[in-house]
Image (spheres, grey):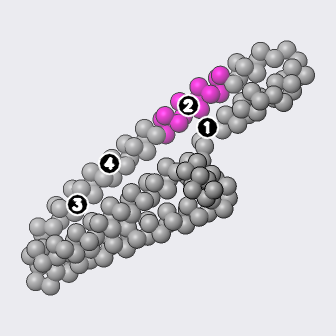
Amino acid sequence: MNEVFIPIIIVPTIMLVIGWIVRTMSTNRRLRETAKLQTEMQTKLLERFGTSQDMLQFLASDAGRKFMESATVERSNPHGRILGGVQAGVLLLLGGVGFFAANPSFGADDGGFGHFLGIMGVMLGAGFLISSFIAVRLSKSWGLLKPSPLTEQASE
């Protein structure tokens, strides 16, 4: 591999890894604080019930059902995960195509490194897009994705 490409690959990789670590730590901290606040609020609410009969009546009401649904901190967000996969897929796919287009300008006689990066980008991008498509299909079949109002109006 040409020594010119080492800083081009290593520096962005290190920056991406550091960014990923910071993002993961901040997300974990936010989820932990949210769970702590929800636990405190739910504990205070449950302490207000004098008898178990009062609590059963509350849990049978609409507000009680919403309270039980809110007991889980992490909710499934298929829309965000699918959109993130599509975004990563499009970026990697276009990046791979860009490496293919810039292949002669890499300076190597055979253009092997640029060709390798192009193949990796296209393959990873296609993989993310296929994964997102499968996630949409499975989410719909499992009832996690509800049809949008626009889709319902178009089918009528």
Task: Say above or below: 61 vs 103.
Answer: above
Return the residue at label 4.
18
Q: Amino acid at mark 4?
A: Ile
Earlier-in-chain disc, 4 versus 1: 4
Question: Is disc 3 surrounded by few (<14), some (14 to 19) or many (20+) residues within 10 Å?
Answer: few
Q: Nearer the viewer, mark 2 or mark 4?
A: 2
Kindly check if marks 2 and 4 are in contact, taking CB atoms under 8 A apart as contact: no
The magenta stretch spans which residues? 28-41
What's under tag 2, amino acid-wise?
Thr
Residue sitting at 67 percent across and 55 percent down? 143
Q: Position of residue 52 (x, y in %)?
A: 88, 22
Q: Are marks 2 and 1 in contact (CB under 8 Å)?
A: yes
Q: Earlier in the sequence, mark 2 or mark 1?
A: 2
- Earlier sequence position, callout 3 versus callout 2: 3
Which residue is tagged 3?
A: 10
Give the residue number, with chain letter if any, for mark 1. 73
